[in-house]
Image: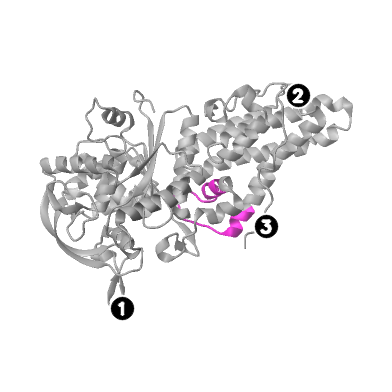
Amino acid sequence: MSTTQKAFYLTTPIYYVNDAPHIGHAYTTVAGDVLTRWHRQRGESVWFLTGTDEHGQKVMRTAHDNGVAPQEWVDRLVANAWKPNWAALNIANDDFIRTTEVRHTERVQKFLQGLKDDGFIYSGKYQGPYCVGCEEFKLPGDLIDADGEKLCPIHSKPVELVDEENWFFKLSAFVEPLLEHYRNNPEACQPESARNEVVSFLEGGVSDLSISRSTFDWGIPVPWDTKQVVYVWFDALLNYATAVGLTDDPDSPGGKKFAATWPADVHLVGKDILRFHAVIWPAMLMAAGLAVPKKVFAHGWLLVGGEKMSKSKLTGIAPSDITDHFGVDAFRYYFLRAIPFGSDGSFSWEDMHARYTSELANDFGNLASRLSAMVEKYCAGVLPAVARDADLESALSTATAKADSAICELDFQGGINAVMDFCKRVNGYVTEKEPWILAKDPKNQQQLEDVLYNTAESLRALAVLLNSVMPATCEILWQSLGAQDVLGDLNSQKIGNVATWGQLPVGAKITKTAVLFPRLELAE
């Protein structure tokens, strides 16, 4: 990444390393990857961060239950589960931050010391409920009553009562600045329902935040009070800034990187951690005199049988459970195509199989197979002269504009729909022109060649437009079209140029490849 141009800086949450990732984690990460790839194909400098949150009581207890030290436990999970899962899903992150890394812990301590020196941290006593599963201090009104016990509404498990001398952050001092921020910058918290929730929460009044714990030691030591460790969420939120050089000298490599990336353009989060990111995090930054993120986008939950996707409720499905059957690109496509990104959505094997068959196998994959077979049969595998079809050109221009606008606004479903509508239009064009009938009469040779060229050129555009969603499949298609030799790498193709018609030249060699999306039986 260049340090002279402000990068489009995008983050996923850092995921809590207590178990292997499930498809809820993958959903967020794939969305981040698609947005990253799209902005790169717009010609922008991009920096994409993901990582793992490795401190806290929950990790410490799980490690103990497994008979290992916390560091060994998190090292094992990161190496054997988290990084391999993201590699398997073709995630093109630029950095992977771990909160146990020295680059993070030292910067957290320096940041925290600065807040204390500026009067934003004070000593106090915390008494109240705490959910270890959420690693969150709970308000009594948030809890569920069940047979005399107080349960966390997320985990349906009893909370613990905490009574500690802690250090507190003056969160209440930032209620009005935060409200003003969201009034003046409504795009800073999306979708609208998320912003309304945050504003309502702030208007109800916010207490100061306990930012340390004294009853366990698996965390970053408070720099002026080593008997306490930094509250895991205060620690974790800082990853977005520590990963790009927070607190480093401006002339150092870290300081220059911070200047080239901060503020973050988009934080992708699940709606269950919205308040941490849209209340606590910007308040921390305001206290330090730093710019707040341009946008926090809270997506909905994935539901299976009506329950949120989570290990705690035993509804976790590993990404490999799906990719082993449907493939990685179908996984990436399905979750962003089937579910509006800001809403809850239900996953079912039946729906995924139906969309795979109808949209990927029949519409997209079959179009590519038909084109390569016909060019081989009727033109000896060589693309005929450049042709034009005004309707297809117009449809491509419209689809490109719609997709670009939608995806940049994190409407992945709308963007993919626009591209797939164009794909359906091309299929309709082929069906209408009936090239297999034209081929029977030599007098129709020019018409036949026009149809084949227009279909190939449409597929060239589809390969570019769907590359961010299905990179492996689109690379196969790109090679099949002979585009690599004449147009260069697929990843170098720009969204702004994709609708320019006639980029595939006469003589390009079209080759048959394996079926892009083989027909599958419904998984048992």
Measuring from the top left, give residue 364's x and y in whole percent.
66, 42
Residue 229: percent from left, percent from top: 19, 53
Image mark for residue 17: none
Asked if the magenta segment contains residue 347, the reply would be yes
**Residue 341 is at least partly visible in this image:** no
Above or below, 323 against 291 in this view is: below
Q: Can residue 420 be seen? A: yes
Query: To which quarter of the image does residue 217 belong?
Result: bottom left
Q: Which residue is mark 3?
A: 521
Residue behind mark 1: 147
The relative height of residue 129 versus residue 354 in the rendered view (above or below) is below
Q: Residue furthest bottom?
A: 147
* Residue labelled with disc 2: 384
> Over which residues does the magenta segment extend?
331-354
Left or right, residue 376 beside residue 169: right
Contact, mark 1 vs mark 2 (Cβ under 8 Å): no
Q: Where 286 sits versus 301, above or below? A: above
Which of pointers 1 and 2 lies earlier in the amino acid sequence?
Answer: 1
> Mark 2, residues whose alpha carbon is within 10 Å: few (<14), some, or many (≥20)?
many
Which of the pair 184/54 is nearer the observer?
54
**Could you tell me if the residues under marks 1 and 3 are in contact, i.e. CB atoms within 8 Å?**
no
Q: Earlier in the sequence, mark 1 or mark 3?
A: 1
